[in-house]
Image: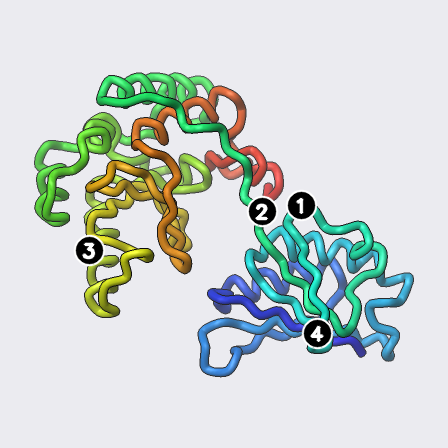
């Protein structure tokens, strides 16, 4: 019998069980989910009860190919050990090496499953509140023409009272471009789950809640500058602890990963918003089967 063990940071039980179910259907692998020592991470133990023939059986290879495709689809930065292997092979999502598909998973090998970020269009060179208005006009036009809810997918603007309440909580003025954006659309409509890149567009009240939560975590753990800073004002969330935030000091937009911390995405909020408009118009973000707006690659891949 050949045993496969998956280890991954942040592979919490709900996600692990979902992956296990998908892998089991694809590759006919019975799966057991368990804790890894005292850490919150999970182990997925996949064992073929095939009388010892294991993954090198010719008949099993097509199923292994399907299993590998699903693993690289759902797992980011995860180690897959086959019988505690020593040799390492890297598998990149969307680019599984042909020899790996041909031979299946080889005992004595550790496979590193890596997420390969999509190449995005460059940040438009725009600046100022007029650029915010221009981007929103394009976004509104696209939603009116392409989304089932039309512009009902976008919330009306935030009140001055709500914006001042946000500024009071974060202890500084909202950067002008974000303030202008919130005054036009205070997040998304109630009937919408995800409106851009599979993320929720946060309203002023949700930004308050997000900032307050992060501040409490930061105070408890101590200063973690690369993970979160009080100047980072979140304005999207993907439901898994990740999202975009605007640095109120530098004016940069960062993508904040709940494990890795923040990384600069665009130099300005106006650039981020205009890129969203361009991606919608170019068909690089679309409405998926659930009515969510996501990057075309993911909308097609997971629908």
Q: Quadrant of the C terminus?
A: top right
Mark 4 touches mark 1? (CB < 8 Å): no
Up-down: is 102 above or below 184?
below
Identify which residue, 150 or 77, lies in the foreground: 77
User: Looking at the rendered structure, which numbered label has been put on residue 212?
Assistant: 3
Closer to the N terminus: mark 3 or mark 2?
2
In front: mark 3 or mark 2?
2
Distance from Cα at disc 3 to Cα at disc 1: 38 Å
User: Looking at the rendered structure, which numbered label has been put on residue 94?
Assistant: 1
Helix, strand or loop at label 2? It is: loop
Please state the horizontal and vertical placement of residue 41, each as a whole percent of the image: 49, 72
Residue drawn 40% across the image and 35% down it: 195
Distance from Cα at disc 4 to Cα at disc 2: 24 Å
Dot 3 alpha-carbon crowd within 10 angstroms: few under 14, some 14 to 19, many 20 or more: some
Helix, strand or loop at label 3? It is: helix
Up-down: is 239 above or below 35?
above
Mark 3 touches mark 1? (CB < 8 Å): no
User: Looking at the rendered structure, which numbered label has been put on residue 279?
Assistant: none
Tell me how many marks there are: 4
Closer to the N terminus: mark 1 or mark 2?
1
Please state the horizontal and vertical placement of residue 156, each as a whole percent of the image: 24, 28
Identify which residue, 285 or 172, lies in the foreground: 172
Residue corresponding to mark 4: 86
Mark 1 touches mark 2? (CB < 8 Å): yes
Dot 4 alpha-carbon crowd within 10 angstroms: few under 14, some 14 to 19, many 20 or more: few
Mark 3 touches mark 2? (CB < 8 Å): no
Closer to the N terminus: mark 3 or mark 4?
4
Closer to the N terminus: mark 4 or mark 2?
4
């Amino acid at each position: 019998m050949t045993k496969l063990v998956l280890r991954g940071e942040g592979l919490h039980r709900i996600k692990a069980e979902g992956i296990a179910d998908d892998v089991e259907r694809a590759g006919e692998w019975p799966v057991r989910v368990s804790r890894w020592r005292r850490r919150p991470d999970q182990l997925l133990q996949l064992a073929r009860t095939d009388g010892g023939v294991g993954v090198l059986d010719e008949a099993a290879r097509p199923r292994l190919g399907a299993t590998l495709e699903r693993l690289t689809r759902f797992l980011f930065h995860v180690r897959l050990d086959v019988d505690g292997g020593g040799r390492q092979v890297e598998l990149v999502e969307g680019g599984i090496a042909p020899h790996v598909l041909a031979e299946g998973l080889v005992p004595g090998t550790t496979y590193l499953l890596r997420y390969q970020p999509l190449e995005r269009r460059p940040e438009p060179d725009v600046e100022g509140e007029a650029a915010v208005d221009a981007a929103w006009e394009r976004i509104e036009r696209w939603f009116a023409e392409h989304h089932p809810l039309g512009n009902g997918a976008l919330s009306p603007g935030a009140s001055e009272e709500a914006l001042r309440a946000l500024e009071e909580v974060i202890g500084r003025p909202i950067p002008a471009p974000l303030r202008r954006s919130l005054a036009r659309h205070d997040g998304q409509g109630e009937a919408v789950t995800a409106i851009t890149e599979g993320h929720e567009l946060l309203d002023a009240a949700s930004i308050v809640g997000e900032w307050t939560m992060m501040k409490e975590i930061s105070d408890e753990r101590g200063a973690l500058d690369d993970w979160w800073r009080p100047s980072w004002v979140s304005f999207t969330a993907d439901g898994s602890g990740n999202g975009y935030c605007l640095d109120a000091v530098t004016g940069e937009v960062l993508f904040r990963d709940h494990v890795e911390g923040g990384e600069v995405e665009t130099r300005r909020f106006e650039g981020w918003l205009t890129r969203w408009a361009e991606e919608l118009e170019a068909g690089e973000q679309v409405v998926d089967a659930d009515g969510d707006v996501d990057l075309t690659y993911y909308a097609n891949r997971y629908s």
